[in-house]
Image (cartoon, helix red, strand yellow):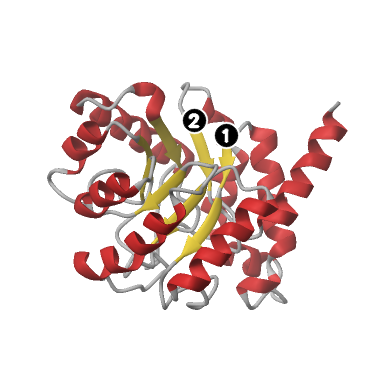
Amino acid sequence: MGVVNVTPDSFSDGGRFHDPAAALAHARRLIADGADLLDIGGESTRPGAEPVSEREELARVLPLIRALAPECPVPISIDTAKPAVARAAVGAGAAIWNDVTALRGAPDSLDVAAALGCEVVLMHMRGEPRTMQDAPRYGDVVAEVEAFLLARAEAAMAAGVRRERIWLDPGIGFGKTLAHNLALIRNLARLRRHGFCVLLGASRKRSIAALDPRATSPDARLGGSLAFALRGAAEGVDAVRVHDVFETVQALRVWSALQG
């Protein structure tokens, strides 16, 4: 899953693709590099990020989805917590709703997801982007994240979302310390055993800098991102959400060949 951030304040690309033309060119490049999915987001969820209005988020994502959908050979995902944005994005051509709040962002999120009939990614996040990294604590992070995601999957199915359209994402870096993130990545197979598709998003995360202080900027975290992606593949995840598509596809192809 290639990442296309049409925001001015993303942690990973600093607004390089905020301009619609630049975003479209970037999306086309990710497809050429081998992306199987594209994840388009118009609101930053980096630690400390401030929320944006529904109108602003729509203005950021809809022009890109409308321009991309007629020519796009891979499914488009809309990364949003707002049901109205998801509804408009699906109407414009998106096929997946990727929600960092696991459909808790609004009272009608579950009902809208069911009505849209699209695939839905349910992610775990402790708190909200502005506060999620304020000393997060867990008794057993793996068990707690697993229980939360299964409960959200049950809520989605009760609302009418079909089981086979539900993805689970442990939310690496969203209200977690380095130790929490490593424990979750080591135990991704526990999520996969429940029969849902699993998405891993660990690309360019700050955990890499915590392990290698030289990786002060997101652009300097490719090696760590590839290591996380390969461990995810070994744990059986169905997709990895990444910024560096060409390099990740190459690493996964070589890794797959080595598995025989």
How many other residues sit within 10 Å of disc 2, few (<14), some (14-19) or many (≥20)?
many
Residue 108 versus residue 13 in the image, above or below: above
Q: Is residue 53 visible?
A: no
Rendering coords of residue 163 (x, y %): 36, 22
Kindly state the secondary structure of the residue where label 2 is placed.
strand
The residue closer to the viewer here, 52 or 18, is 18
Q: Are marks 2 and 1 in contact (CB under 8 Å)?
A: yes
Instruction: Provide the residue designation for mark 1.
Output: 238
The residue closer to the viewer here, 144 or 26, is 26
The residue closer to the viewer here, 201 or 60, is 60
Q: Residue at x 23, y 31 (%)?
A: 114
Q: Mark 2 or mark 1, which has the lower sequence index?
A: 2
Q: Residue at x 31, y 45 (%)?
A: 90
Q: Amino acid at mark 1?
A: Asp
Q: Residue at x 87, y 34 (%)?
A: 258
Q: Is residue 45 left or right of residue 257?
A: left
Instruction: Provide the residue designation for mark 2.
Output: 197
Q: Quadrant of the C terminus?
A: top right
How many other residues sit within 10 Å of disc 1, few (<14), some (14-19) or many (≥20)?
some
Residue 220 versus residue 39 in the image, above or below: below
Rendering coords of residue 199 (x, y %): 51, 41
